[in-house]
Image: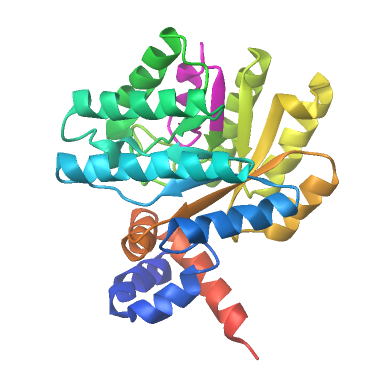
Amino acid sequence: MALLDRAIVRALPAVPRGIVGRLSSRYIAGPTLEDAVRVVRRLNAEGKMATVDVLGEEIHDAEAARDIARAYHQVFARIEGEKLDANVSIKLTGLGLVLDEGLCRELVGELVRDASVRGNFVRIDMEDSTTTDATLALYRGLRADGRDNVGVVLQARLRRTEGDVAGLHNVRLCKGIYVEPPAIAYQDAEEIRASFRRTLAALLDQGAYVGIATHDESLIDDALRQVRERGLSREQYEFQMLLGVRPERGDALVRGGHRLRVYVPFGTHWYEYSLRRLQENPAIAGYVAADVLRRLRP
């Protein structure tokens, strides 16, 4: 299966953009903010929250980073203006992290302040392992400055993750999609699941608010058990899922009285985003291909 997944990834650049666009429409809101707002409205009507992501990574100049920051300020304005139940998720590489850490801190600080004024929240996403230290340092610095409307992400795949838990207040916990070497990341699927369970327990035990971000049924079941055993109220945690992935399971969580937040990416870089996610983790390609075949059957 791994060989087939890699073959699918190699073939993706030859697939016409129009076809990729039609297939990705289930997972990406669209190229414009209006598309994102439309999807968030629908999710809110279904009793779900949202987190909006402006697509754009591997930024090569400061002005491009500022453009992404301006796009996020526009997102905050629309969320406030339309009273949407949504926050945002940002990637530091899209805000200039690899160009100029000072610029990145400036842009993120402005976004967090804007969010605070509007009663909103910023989630700092976690990228590959080369950015982990800088991401956690920026998050911790903002919290030390009294910015409590900012959260971060931990990836269960990384061996270091349990050691990063201490002192974190608001965390999205996910498996992580980035392919990393065995020295720093678990490779076996069950080892990653075990790390996820342990990290979730450590976060909940220290009173952190956790966005439990998984589509893995065994991890959902374990999270429900941990929440139940601790007697947590629905305001003390939430589940998180990707747009278009297992929506029926998300519906069941909502019906069960749990809060669910759906990740809503949008932007003109949708094609590059789609290819990059698959190239970073070829195993995902097999799932996408299976989904495509299922949808194309008469």
Viewer-nearest residue: 198 or 212: 212
Tell me how the rendering is colored. Answer: rainbow
User: Residues in magenta?
Assistant: 153-172
Q: Position of residue 100 (x, y in %)?
A: 16, 29
Placement of 142 over or under 266, stated as above or below: above
Q: Position of residue 66 (x, y in %)?
A: 25, 39
Image quarter for residue 259? top right
Give the residue at x 33% y 33%: 183
Quick check: can you spot residue 149?
yes
Placement of 35 over or under 21, stated as above or below: above
Placement of 116 over or under 60, stated as above or below: above
Q: Position of residue 240 (x, y in %)?
A: 62, 42
Which residue is situated farthest in the bottom direction here? 298
Quadrant of the drawing holding the C terminus:
bottom right
Viewer-nearest residue: 30 or 245: 30
Image quarter for residue 129? top left
Q: Per the image, is 170 magenta?
A: yes
Give the residue at x 27% y 33%: 130
Viewer-nearest residue: 232 or 39: 39
Quick check: can you spot residue 160?
no
Relative to 224, 107 lies left or right:
left
Q: Per the image, is 159 magenta?
A: yes
Viewer-nearest residue: 165 or 282: 165
Which residue is situated farthest in the front direction here? 81
How many numbered marks have been drawn onto this rendered protein structure?
0
Give the residue at x 58% y 59%: 38
Q: Position of residue 228 (x, y in %)?
A: 83, 28
